[in-house]
Amino acid sequence: MILVLDFGSQYTQLIARRIRELKVYCEIHPFNITHDEIKNLNPKGIILSGGPSSVLGESSPTIDKEIFEWGIPILGICYGLQLMAKLLGGRVESSSSSEYGKTEITIKKNNLFFKNIPDKNTLTVWMSHGDRVIEIPDDFEILAESNNSPFAAVADVDRKLYGIQFHPEVTHTDHGIEILKNFVFGVCQCDPTWNMESFKETKIKEIQDQVGNEKVLCALSGGVDSSVTAVLLHQAIKDNLICIFVDNGLLRKDEARKVVELFKKHYHINLIHINASEIFWEKLKGVADPEEKRKIIGIEFINIFEKEASKLEGIKYLAQGTLYPDVIESVSFKGPSAVIKSHHNVGGLPEEMKMSLVEPLRELFKDEVRELGVSLGLDEELVYRHPFPGPGLGIRILGEITREKIEVLQEADHIVMEEIKKAGYYRKVWQSFAVLLPVRSVGVMGDARTYEWTIAVRCVSSIDAMTADWVQLPYELLGKISNRLINEVQKINRVVYDITSKPPGTIEWE
């Protein structure tokens, strides 16, 4: 495995993702984990991430320089390079001329680190720094330089210590993946043996060892994460898995029926289906504030789930579809995320339930969960399903939620999905959906005046939902969607297309 020590870079998760794409396992841990913890992980290589701090600051994050004497290959990226240089006797200064964005570096020595890079002297890379190294430690040599960074890439080859001022993990850096390959395979001597088949086999054995012959309870929503969790657990413990599916009345058209048919009839999973639509609708009556809607939906879900769970005896474990980004954000050092809104999913384990957690996906990123789903034999339509928020259509109906609005939006969303799929865009985009706006406008249908609601269509591209761009769908496709929405969905007489990126907007409207 490769260990990434996190100093707060916005790109830290991307480093791990890139290395896993090379079929080498990689974990992220905060920079201040103990030496014993690092040794227990037994990494073949360590990467020091970038970060927003300055190594010149008195309280800047640091590590014990003893780590450089262990004989483990180390790569410092941006802040990681500057920290390595400072700790080993080099000098760093605050530069009057920062480097942000695309920059050309000149390769001075084409050794193992720049192997398989096209034979040329310059390379376009992505820089993001204010400080710069102005003197490298003894025994280090220059591998590359830029106009502002005389030590854009350096190495102590004998001790297998490397440092680069740029970010190879971002797509803006030419041949960045090759540079990471050279470190992972050439310097660290890793083998590309990590894949979903091996993960699945290992994880099934871990689940069996953890829970033994005890029963496990799982909240099933029908989304990708909970579905993969349920099928993986079922392969491991068979009938000792019990799933509870709470229909909150805010799901897509026919979704509740499809979930029950798939998991109960096809996978033969012990599934308890609770139709709680009326309860949720009553609780949400008259509520317009988005945060209040989220809290009501989340609290009511917990109440219903606990009530049903209390009817079952001998349940000692609760399964959750926690993913690796959730784990990282809970321990990361000054990560880039801020709380813009409360999370879609219900977080945390109710204390009174007294169960131990089973989180079989906690080492995986979203794209890896999909890969695991395919390995488990799940239908690709489910595995590659677009993300759907926990509060469901409740946060895609702006303002107060009513049964009539839910039915209107279910029909509208169904049409948007149909046309996106027909046009071949479903697998090309991150997310597409319809939003019902609390806005009425005047229209004309059959020579008669109408005064009906507006549907906003949203379609974005993204990698991990941290940022997103609106998709430039063909006018012809947008025209078909608009025409069908107005002609087939009652109470709709106007359609608009959302062309807001994230940031400044969010993907969901509430």
Image (cartoon, grey):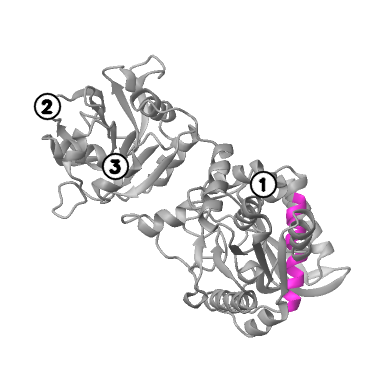
Q: Element type at marker 2?
A: loop
Tell which residue pokes out farthest to the right in this image: 446
Rendered-image quadrant of the C terminus: bottom right
Instruction: Kindly identify which residue carries mark 2.
Output: 138
Q: Does the stretch in magenta take in 413?
A: yes
Horizontal arrangement in the rendering, residue 484 relative to residue 350 (left or right): right
Q: Quadrant of residue 451?
A: bottom right
Q: Nearer the viewer, mark 2 or mark 3?
A: 3
Per the rendered image, the range of residues in magenta is 403-419
Q: Which of label 2 and label 1 is nearer to you?
A: 2
In the visual, does 244 lie left or right of 159?
right
3D distance between C-alphas at marks 2 and 3: 27 Å
Specify which label sits upstream in the sequence, 1 or 3. Answer: 3
Kind of residue at disc 2:
Asp
Residue 268 vs residue 400, the one in the foreground: 268
Queried whether the magenta region covers residue 43, the answer comes back as no
Badge 1 marks a residue whose secondary structure is loop
Tell whether 408 sits left or right of 128.
Answer: right
Viewer-nearest residue: 280 or 53: 280
Q: Is residue 422 above or below residue 269?
A: above
Residue indicated by mark 1? 473
Q: Tell me which residue sits at (55%, 61%) in the image.
A: 320
Q: Which element is circle 3 on?
A: helix
Q: Are marks 1 and 3 in contact (CB under 8 Å)?
A: no
Secondary structure character of the magenta stretch overall = helix
Mark 2 touches mark 3? (CB < 8 Å)? no
Indicate which disc residue 39 carries: 3
Q: Which mark is residue 143?
A: none
Comes first in the chain, label 2 or label 3: 3
